[in-house]
Amino acid sequence: MTTPTIAEAARLFAAKTLSPRELVRDCLDRAERLNPVIHAFIRFTREAALAAAAESETRWMKGAQRGPLDGIPIAHKDIYETAGVVTTGHSRVLLHHVPQEDAATVRQWKAAGAVSLGKLATHEFAWGGPSFDLPWPPARNPWDITRFTGGSSSGTGAAVAAGVILGGTGSDTGGSIRMPAALCGTAGIKPTYGLCSRAGVLPLAQSLDTTGPLAWTVEDCALLLQAMAGHDPADPSSADRPAPDLLGGLRDGVKGLRIGVIRHFHETDMPVSPGMQTAIDTAAAALREAGAEVGEASLPSLQAFNAAGWVILAAEAYAVHEPWLRTRYRDYGEFLRERLAVAATLSAADYIQAQRRRRELADAVGEQMRHFDILLTAGSPGEARPIEQMTKWASFEGPNFTIPFNLTGQPGVVVTAGFGQGGLPLGIQIIGRPFEDAMALRVGHALETVLGLRGQRPKLPA
Amino acid sequence: MLHLQHQRTDAMSDPLSRPAFDTAMARAGIVLTEAEAEGIRAATAHAARFAAAVRVDRPVAHEPATTFAPQEPKR
């Protein structure tokens, strides 16, 4: 079976030409068969999935379906707590942790009828990877299994790209939704900070953490995000405002929108591969052709964002893990425990200076957003690198393109805008104003439609 | 308005000195082998570089981030 998108599957369910049981069973079978190759899952929940699919099928047959996610095979990054199902953070530290309750998003997607196939690989506690000394191996990129998936939502990126789930949960503290989406050739959105609840999700750095979906298309991301957006009093960072309509304007196009390409990010601050440069130029030209006004945005340097983002992320992550580091240091994988040990050397003044800098950087971006509705930049420097090049300190050495928008809290959508010389996908970022996630999705959908690249899937064993 | 200037030196992107590193690890309760300690200490150069980069000159009383707003109790 060719994996449908969520929107296509819902139409096929409605037409009764595909059943949830058929789709869930097919996805599960392929996921289990491919897992020794791509390592996207660390745990399957087959029996529960088949039971949920049968219930969904009954609802569709009665015309009592809960919406477009009813019967859709999804899975959760293993930092999302799942009631009665072990949730480890891909770590030996929580090897036997069985939550009593579902995370808010798990509960919301379940209520919408989505069927979870299991728990997905992640970098250890969303920061320590790709590691080979954990209870499970790191996920592999389905486009080339010698390559890195991006992280930390590595299993979600791999499973969506492989077509064994139609969507899944990720989390994004410094780019952990957008980087795997870019490198695995899926769509993904880091929503505005505060749009989606983080209740029941293992934290990394709480002033930066966001939850969000990855899926094959931007439309599918919008469907998934719609089901998880909204205020949750159980999460102190949750914005007390009504959930936005993320679907109504999705097909409104880009005519008249002002789009700013942050050229200095990918041309000067962190020069990208020729393929990525072409992908960005192609996307900008396509948006101009579709009626957008495309100009050039100027922000503080990528290095300035990266310094503030790294200090905040590291200091907050150390604060989360401090008690376990004292008592269970050797239960962590080498990458995470040593990164956290570096974080332990930061001072209180370092952290406060970084938070001050964050506010100034966010104000500078806010000023640019008076002139532009959307910003455009790279999702990564180029194609996915060989996994063995992702060394312990690699992520400390150069800036990434994603962390600026964790600092500012803005929504960021990743869309595949081309393929590199190695045949691997190249994802770019579409950045909106805070709480204008719908506009970022709208531009992403328009771009995805005109580029017409969604027909290309990685070649994997049947 | 009074400004404080951050003094920048090469040391701001050097690794922590061994005594300072050992103190930080002791405070964190992290026990390392000698080889681990030297590897992690070398990586503190990255942290020092980032910590230096977030220090920009601004008026001493200018506080853009770490203020606190008391909330009235809910009735």
Image: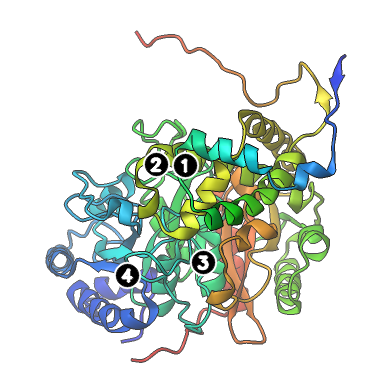
Q: CA distance from mark 3 to mark 2?
A: 21 Å
Q: Position of residue A295 (x, y in %)?
A: 82, 58
In the rendered view of the protein, which quadrant contains the C terminus of chain A? bottom left
Q: CA distance from mark 2 to mark 1?
A: 7 Å
**What residue is shown with label 4?**
A41
Q: CA distance from mark 3 to mark 4?
A: 15 Å
Q: Nearer the viewer, mark 1 or mark 3?
A: 3
Amino acid type at circle 4 is: Phe
Q: Is residue A250 left or right of residue A170?
A: right
The answer to whether marks 4 and 1 mark residues whose Cβ atoms lie closer than 8 Å is no
Q: Residue A237 versus residue A128: which sits nearer the camera?
A: A128
Label drawn at residue A159: none
Residue A191 visible in rendering: no
The answer to whether marks 4 and 2 mark residues whose Cβ atoms lie closer than 8 Å is no
State whether residue A373 is above or below residue B23. below
Q: Is residue A233 left or right of residue A314?
A: left
**What residue is shown with label 2?**
A197
Q: CA distance from mark 1 to mark 3?
A: 21 Å
Q: How is the image coloured?
A: rainbow
Earlier in the chain: of badge 1 and badge 3, it is 3
> Circle 2: is it few (<14), some (14-19), or many (20+) Cα within 10 Å?
many
Label 1: which secondary element: loop
**What residue is shown with label 1?**
A195
Q: CA distance from mark 4 to mark 2?
A: 24 Å
**What residue is shown with label 3?**
A180
